Amino acid sequence: MQMIDKKISLGSIITLIALVSTIIFTQGATQNKIINLESNVDDNRKKIMSNKEKHQNIEIHVVKLETMMTERFNRLEQLIIEK
């Protein structure tokens, strides 16, 4: 029966420290990426809402212009008919 060596070697300690450090670094980097993505999502949501408002305003202006053009064409028709 062999005895298990219960001594902790310097290599084992360094390996354990390297492993723990890598896990902590990876966790921090992943958390940072998640925070950046959430920030980008919020920025994109604001941009989309702003663009929707601009689009709606443009549609309103187009309808107003169409109405004005229709009124002026009707007025022009009346003037042509009166002459």
Image (cartoon, helix red, strand yellow):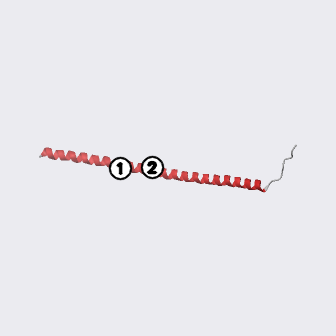
Helix, strand or loop at disc 1?
helix
Q: Earlier in the sequence, mark 2 or mark 1?
A: 2
Residue type at mark 2 is Ile
Task: Give the residue furthest to the top.
Answer: 1
Task: Provide the residue designation for mark 1.
Answer: 58
| Residue at the (22%, 48%) spot, across then down | 72
Q: Nearer the viewer, residue 10 or 66?
A: 10
Tell me if mark 1 has few (under 14), some (14-19) or many (20+) residues whose alpha carbon lies within 10 angstroms of its own: few
Q: Residue 19 vs residue 71: left or right?
A: right
Task: Give the residue furthest to the right.
Answer: 1
| Residue at the (76%, 55%) spot, across then down | 11
Quarter assignment of residue 9 = bottom right
Task: Provide the residue designation for mark 2.
Answer: 48
| Residue at the (17%, 45%) spot, across then down | 78
Q: Quadrant of the N terminus?
A: top right
In the rendered image, residue 55, in percent from the top left (x then y), is placed at: 38, 49
Q: How many numbered marks appear?
A: 2
